[in-house]
Image (tube, rainbow, N blue to C red):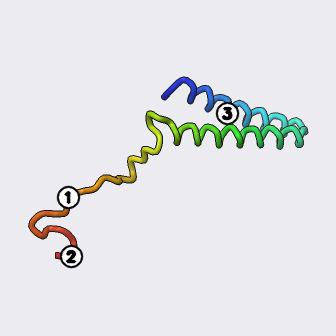
């Protein structure tokens, strides 16, 4: 992973922790505002990872390559 991704994850964790602490100490409106900031940062991080030129749109559990059909009728339905 890149250092910028670690920094963004740390920023999301820090804002979420700050929202939790401010809610714990009774500052509900401040906690809600910080949670909204945390949500925006999380969406930004998600989009940053998806549109990354190095690993963007890589989903190893989904294989999209074209495969050759089975040889000698050993496929399904034979």
* Residue identified by numbered label 2: 77
Percent coordinates x, y for residue 57 in the rendering: 46, 45
Tell me which numbered mark, 2 or 1, is placed earlier along the sequence: 1
Q: Which residue is mark 3?
A: 13
Corner quadrant of residue 21? top right
**Disc 3 from disc 2: Cα separation:** 51 Å
Say whether residue 61 is left or right of residue 71: right
Q: Is residue 76 left or right of residue 59?
A: left
> What residue is rendered at 57% in x and 37% in y?
48
Q: Which one is closest to the eye, mark 2 or mark 1?
A: 1
- Per the image, label 3 sits on a secondary structure element best described as helix
Q: What's the CA distance linking mark 3 and mark 1?
A: 46 Å
Viewer-nearest residue: 28 or 64: 64
> In the current view of this chain or complex, which residue is farthest to the bottom?
77
Q: Which mark is residue 78?
A: none
- The residue to which callout 1 is attached is 68
């Amino acid at each position: 992973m890149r250092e910028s991704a670690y920094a963004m994850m740390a920023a999301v964790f820090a804002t979420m922790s700050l929202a939790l602490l401010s809610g714990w100490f009774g500052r509900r409106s401040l906690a809600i505002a910080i949670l909204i900031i945390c949500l925006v940062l999380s969406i930004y991080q998600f989009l940053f990872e998806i549109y990354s030129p190095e690993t963007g749109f890589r989903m190893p559990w989904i294989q999209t390559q074209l495969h050759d059909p089975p040889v000698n009728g050993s496929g399904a339905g034979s």
